[in-house]
Image (cartoon, rainbow, N blue to C red):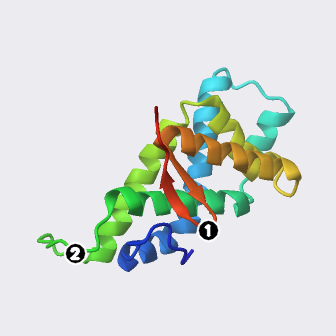
Amino acid sequence: MKRRFFPFDKNYLLQNAQIELKDSLLNQMVEIVKEIYLMRYNPLGLKDKSIEKILSTTNYNLEELSTFYEELAGFYRYKYSSNQLELLFDGRDHQEKYEEDWSNTLKKWVIEFSKSKNFLKAVLETSIFFPDDKQSQLAYSRLKNYMTDHFGIKIYKHKGIVPMKIA
């Protein structure tokens, strides 16, 4: 994940905190999406093949979501971070503060994104239903498009983060 998304992407403490939390936050992301999906689209708890698969799956394929996570982390650094360390008076070090801030923000974003049925379906498709299929890559493309629409930015492989011009 040591990819620079913009010229001043040099908050290495925040980037390290994001790397350390990656696996646990990705698993939490899928758990949150599962819970919201089941509450919204299966409030009676009826079971069919797809619901049983959602409930029984505990090991998720996080490959496509990993790239999405890295892009969200890069956007967070672009929008909310500074290269200057602030003074902390609560006894924590900066790594702990960055870990807490990033995990709270990501959870808020996932809950906000989960208002969209397309986001819920894309996360479930990439992690549970089609983990080794081309469908997983298509679902990742939908996630990326959702992020572009939601934040008004586009992330290119070689250019990094580019704000979109809105008419």
| Residue toward you, 11 or 124 | 11
Relative to 58, residue 159 above or below? below
**Residue pictured at 69% horizontal, 61% vertical:** 62
Which residue is the extreme one toward the top?
Answer: 44
**Which residue in the protein does label 1 denote?**
158
**Residue pictured at 51% horizontal, 44% vertical:** 110
Relative to 62, residue 45 above or below? above
Report whether 115 appears left or right of 65.
left
Report whether 18 appears left or right of 40.
left
Give x and y (percent) for residue 104: 38, 53
| Residue toward you, 141 or 24 | 141
Return the mark for residue 147: none
**Which residue in the protein does label 2 denote?**
85
Give x and y (percent) for residue 13: 36, 78
Report whether 117 appears left or right of 24.
right
Q: Secondary structure at mark 2?
A: loop
Report whether 72 appears left or right of 10.
right
Quadrant of the snapshot with the N terminus: bottom right
Give x and y (percent) for residue 81: 32, 64
Kindly identify the amino acid type of the residue bearing the numbered disc 2: Leu
**Residue pictured at 67% horizontal, 20% vertical:** 44
Q: Secondary structure at mark 1?
A: loop
Pointer 1 local density, CA inside 10 Å: few below 14, some 14–19, many at least 20: few
Which residue is the extreme one toward the left?
Answer: 89
**Residue pictured at 35% horizontal, 62% vertical:** 100
Q: Quadrant of residue 88?
A: bottom left
Kindly identify the amino acid type of the residue bearing the numbered disc 1: His
